């Protein structure tokens, strides 16, 4: 399974996009601002670099549950798909991760539990059949 993340609405302090499985729309995404790699990473305020990365499911100490983890991202560790906090702007809850939600506006993504649960189930099934990658554009 190859997920595809498109970054459709780059804003000054956040990036709103979409996540697909092949051509099927799955959910909206919220990330930190996209920067050029040569500009360098600003901790907690930089989206992961474009590329293709392996995805697995693993336990998150921060969230105390199994979440999708994105592996092999240069300059980043502990990158996951997770939900956004409804009480904070997206940039205060991502720390480089990708938040998923069923709806969006310029502030971030919402209805995160539904989106995250569906994504985890899809990844579980795909891992049983082979592997999972995400192409970040």
Image (spheres, helix red, strand yellow):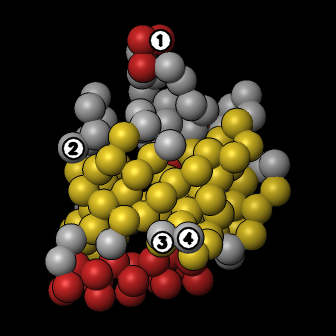
Query: Is residue 116 at least partly visible in the picture?
Result: yes
Would you say the residues marked 4 and 3 are in contact, meaning their CB atoms lie under 8 Å apart? no
Q: Report helix, strand or loop for mark 3.
A: strand
Q: Residue at x 45, y 47 (%)?
A: 136
Write the residue at 55% across / 63% down: 19
Residue underneath mark 3: 21
Query: At which x and y percent is residue 77?
Result: 26, 41
Q: Quadrant of the N terminus?
A: bottom left
Considering depth in this image, is 23 or 16 the residue closer to the camera? 23
Q: Is residue 6 above or below residue 43?
A: below
Per the image, the residue denoted by label 1 is 39
For discs 3 and 2, the disc positioned in front in the rendered view: 3
Displayed quadrant of residue 101 = bottom right
Q: Viewer-nearest of labels 4 and 3?
A: 4
Q: Which residue is mark 4?
A: 23
Q: Secondary structure at mark 1?
A: helix
Q: CA distance from mark 4 to mark 3?
A: 6 Å
User: Which callout, 4 or 2, points at the residue further toward the start of the chain?
Assistant: 4
- Circle on res. 72: 2
Marks 4 and 1 close (CB-CB < 8 Å): no
Circle nearer the N terminus (4, 1): 4
Q: Nearer the viewer, mark 1 or mark 3?
A: 3
Q: Secondary structure at mark 4?
A: loop
Marks 1 and 3, how far apart at CA: 30 Å
């Amino acid at each position: 399974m190859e997920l595809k993340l498109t970054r459709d609405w780059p804003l000054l302090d956040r990036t709103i996009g979409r996540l697909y499985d092949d051509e099927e729309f799955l959910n909206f995404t919220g990330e930190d601002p996209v920067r050029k790699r040569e500009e360098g990473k600003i901790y907690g305020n930089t989206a992961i670099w474009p590329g293709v990365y392996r995805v697995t499911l693993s336990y998150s100490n921060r969230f105390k549950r199994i979440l999708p983890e994105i592996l092999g991202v240069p300059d980043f560790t502990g990158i996951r798909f997770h939900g956004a906090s409804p009480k904070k702007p997206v940039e205060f809850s991502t720390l480089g991760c990708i938040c998923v939600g069923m709806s969006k506006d310029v502030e971030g993504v919402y209805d995160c539990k539904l989106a995250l649960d569906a994504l985890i189930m899809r990844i579980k099934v795909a891992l049983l059949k082979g592997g999972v990658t995400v192409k970040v554009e």
